[in-house]
Image (spheres, rainbow, N blue to C red):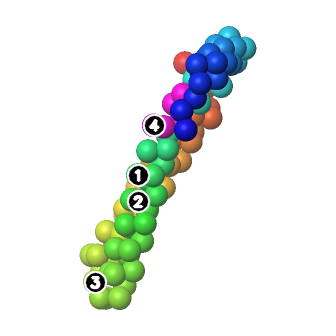
Amino acid sequence: MALSERERHELSMLEEQLKSEDPKLAQALSAGELRNAATGALFFLMALGIVILIAGVAASAVILSLSGIVLVAAAITWMVSRWVRTNYKTYG
């Protein structure tokens, strides 16, 4: 359903108001697509690691099990580092 010209104008006015009142929130909302893509990649890597781990345990393959553990650990580390960068500012 397409927006009318009036609705588009109102939305752009709201967007400008948001940018002037809370630029940090506006920036976070505009970067949402990239965060969602990265979050999807993280969950995919974690799921893949779990599948590899289960396959390694089922096949009694130590190397495969360790590969799954490493992949899950890497995904968790990546997720935590993204969270820390987003929520904590470093000074120095």
Tag 1 or tag 4, which sits nearer the N-term?
4
Examine the structure image and report whether residue 66 is included in the region drawn in magenta: no
Q: What's the CA distance linking mark 3 and mark 2?
A: 22 Å
* Horizontal side, residue 71 vs residue 76: left or right: left
Q: Which image quarter: residue 64?
A: bottom left
Q: Amino acid at mark 3?
A: Ala
Is label 4 in contact with label 2 (beta carbons under 8 Å)?
Answer: no
Q: What's the CA distance linking mark 1 and mark 3?
A: 26 Å
Kindly state the secondary structure of the residue where label 3 is placed. loop
Please report the residue visible at 45 percent of the width from the left and 52 percent of the height from the top.
40
Which region shows up in magenta?
Answer: 30-34
Task: Give the class, few, some or many, for how many residues have Cα within 10 Å of label 3's Cα (few <14, many ≥20).
Answer: few
Q: Nearer the viewer, mark 4 or mark 3?
A: 4
Q: What's the CA distance linking mark 4 and mark 3?
A: 37 Å
Residue on which disc 3 sits: 61
Kindly state the secondary structure of the residue where label 2 is placed. helix
Q: Amino acid at mark 4?
A: Leu
